[in-house]
Image (spheres, coloured by chain):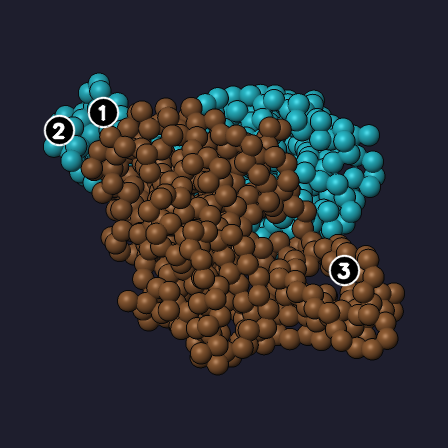
Chain colours: A cyan, B brown
Amino acid sequence: MALIVQKYGGTSVGNPDRIKNVARRVARCRAEGDQVVVVVSAMSGVTDGLIKLAKEISPQPSERELDMLLSTGEQTTIALTAMALHSLEVPAVSLTGAQAGIVTDGVHSKAKIRNISPDRIHEFLQEGNVVIVAGFQGQTDEGHITTLGRGGSDLTAIALAAALGADLCQIYTDVDGVYTADPRVVKSARKLNEVAYDEMLELASLGAKVMQSRSVEFAKKFGVVFEVRSSLNDNPGTIVKEETESMENVVIRGVTLDKNQAKVTLAAVPDHPGAASKIFKSLAAINVNVDMIVQTSSHGAGVKTTDISFTLDKPDLPKALKKLESLKAEIGFAEILADEGIGKLSMVGVGMRSHSGVAAKMFDTLASNEINIDMISTSEIKISVVIELSRGEDAMRVVHDAFLGA
Amino acid sequence: MALIVQKYGGTSVGNPDRIKNVARRVARCRAEGDQVVVVVSAMSGVTDGLIKLAKEISPQPSERELDMLLSTGEQTTIALTAMALHSLEVPAVSLTGAQAGIVTDGVHSKAKIRNISPDRIHEFLQEGNVVIVAGFQGQTDEGHITTLGRGGSDLTAIALAAALGADLCQIYTDVDGVYTADPRVVKSARKLNEVAYDEMLELASLGAKVMQSRSVEFAKKFGVVFEVRSSLNDNPGTIVKEETESMENVVIRGVTLDKNQAKVTLAAVPDHPGAASKIFKSLAAINVNVDMIVQTSSHGAGVKTTDISFTLDKPDLPKALKKLESLKAEIGFAEILADEGIGKLSMVGVGMRSHSGVAAKMFDTLASNEINIDMISTSEIKISVVIELSRGEDAMRVVHDAFLGA
């Protein structure tokens, strides 16, 4: 008898019929003799509806009260899911985050899980129940309701799997698993059977939006092996786990394209100490996340200057430009250039560490397809290049096929 | 500095604008230096919407899970009300029933309040907050969420007023208070300045649907003086309190008409012991509430028989008739007659105890208006008669004017 934690997202529980489907899936699992803990999100659209209601009352609602409000979304789903299981004659009990013993810090709207007291869940499981836990929420030591922020229900499932010592944690979503590339763009993309935490982290942060990084980080920290799979079919999904030796035989796990970046170039920045520091500190102060940074010497006569280029999230561009404009005189650069027509192409794989010539092969593949590389950034298990957005999908296809093609 | 408990029903918090109105009213009260605890219901329509959702999942949802589901309705309102107060720069904190320390028994969907631990509310009040508590809900000692059933938010307010030792408890509703008769029917009806608990109880049970009896009973038991008043204007309402000597000077406090009763007559019931007992036990067993009962001897020849008439709630009539039909042979009565065209007219007043001739005057008033009396039932502070439904409103007017007219 295994103990399984299953998590279903907002789309999977989006209406009464879908909730009944989830119940059937849970019932089947239980009929095989397993103990099941189910974590559910709010029905799709519910959280947005509640936020809209709050905004009608107050443009900037207090985060404590917003948590009080939003936590009703998952509470609704757990009750309905329990009812659907009862209809199938499966004993089931729903628990809010607080009731499930999920204790968080007091940072409303993005609380961190401090600890979980799983006694109550164990009791209900012992009595033969399926236990349904509200994702995304917990309570502080003082009894205030908190929410965990984006991707919070995944986090609830993984943290519960750790606290309960579960044998398996399944994250049900609307995709079949993690792919070597976006299958809508790259026809030859394949579903991965397994992926290492670090690879999953890079893929998540690179725009393959299967899961939020923090849930994967949590799983890595506590060694929780989990499976990402579809709630719409019975196909096996992708297992996310600690890196194994056999994983290193594969050079590249996947290729991603991030279309949501913009590039800023500051031309002719006087080359004296502190200029770059001032620029990036100012941007950090207004919560602009800078990703890739490249600095090149310029060959003008007279005062020595450099060009500094960097990428940032497209929506942050206007406020970044405004801030930079205000620094222009003080720092003394000549010009600000912005380019929204870029894409960031990345290859990820733990096998990169032990294979040489990977970057060269990537650059060569792009060059032979006449795709120009604008910026380059590398880490231990990742190579990213900035290219023209209009060639982004072509680039993804040729790189994917060079490294991962059949 | 007084401590005031205010309760606002579903209509008063029915949309964001109305919630803002409630917030303004609370803010005004607090600006006068008082401490305020606010109890709110679910926004009107929300509870019904949730029940509908549950029925789409399961025709007979478990009561524990229904409580889990329905309690989100009030939780939504408390968060929005707190936000509305923050917008007016009034510090406010929302608390679910569980967080407010409301402990109930485990009878889901109609739980009874066992005790209230008000420490947390006191703390938040001390810190200068308005405290907003979800009505209608609590939790068991084991931490299960429960709801209190119909009228539960009134009960929450009155129980909190008792536990907190509040100076005043105000029940805000969509009527101005308690009237001597339904003002839509009786033009000369007046709002009462005060009414005794017992009178309020009889009025509530007689169809003057301002409040549920159980809340009034609770207030009586714990001596909580409360005011029923409108959330739509600033008119003073009706104070409900212990009977005083001066109340006895008024013979009749109010006149009500219950149009929701039906009359059943069993003709020629054999007059032997146990027949009536069997009939009413059988009806109780299928949850039919019988109200007035009249038994008259019949004058047929041969075996001695009686006619038994009684009234019951109109919606219960079909199942009652079916049950009675099944008993016909066994008990041996001749015929079942049902009449849905009746009304029950009642007069209530503690002054009746010390005034004689009240019933006679009532019967006389009806007779002189050619309104026939079908059944009569009296208690210490109430006289009820069953009359033809089509004459019900006329009867209400003439009786009201005879006893309470200007």
**Of residues A403 and A110, which is closer to you in this image?**
A110
Q: Quickly name the residue at label 2.
A: A330
Q: Quickly name the residue at label 3.
A: B276
Residue type beneath disc 1: Lys
Question: Is residue A158 rendered to the left or right of residue B365?
Answer: right
Seen at 45% across and 23% down, the residue is A142
Parent chain of label 1 = A
In the rendered image, the quadrant that contains the C terminus of chain B is: bottom left
- Mark 3 and mark 1: Cα distance apart in space: 95 Å
- Mark 3 and mark 2: Cα distance apart in space: 100 Å
- Across and down, in percent, residue A368 comes to 51, 45
Report the disc number at residue B217: none
Seen at 32% across and 67% down, the residue is B405
Few, some or many residues within 10 Å of mark 1 (<14, 14–19, 20+): few
**Of residues B336 and A406, which is closer to you in this image?**
B336
- Across and down, in percent, residue A126 comes to 76, 28
Few, some or many residues within 10 Å of mark 3 (<14, 14–19, 20+): some
Q: Is residue A18 above or below residue B386?
A: above
Residue type beneath disc 3: Ala
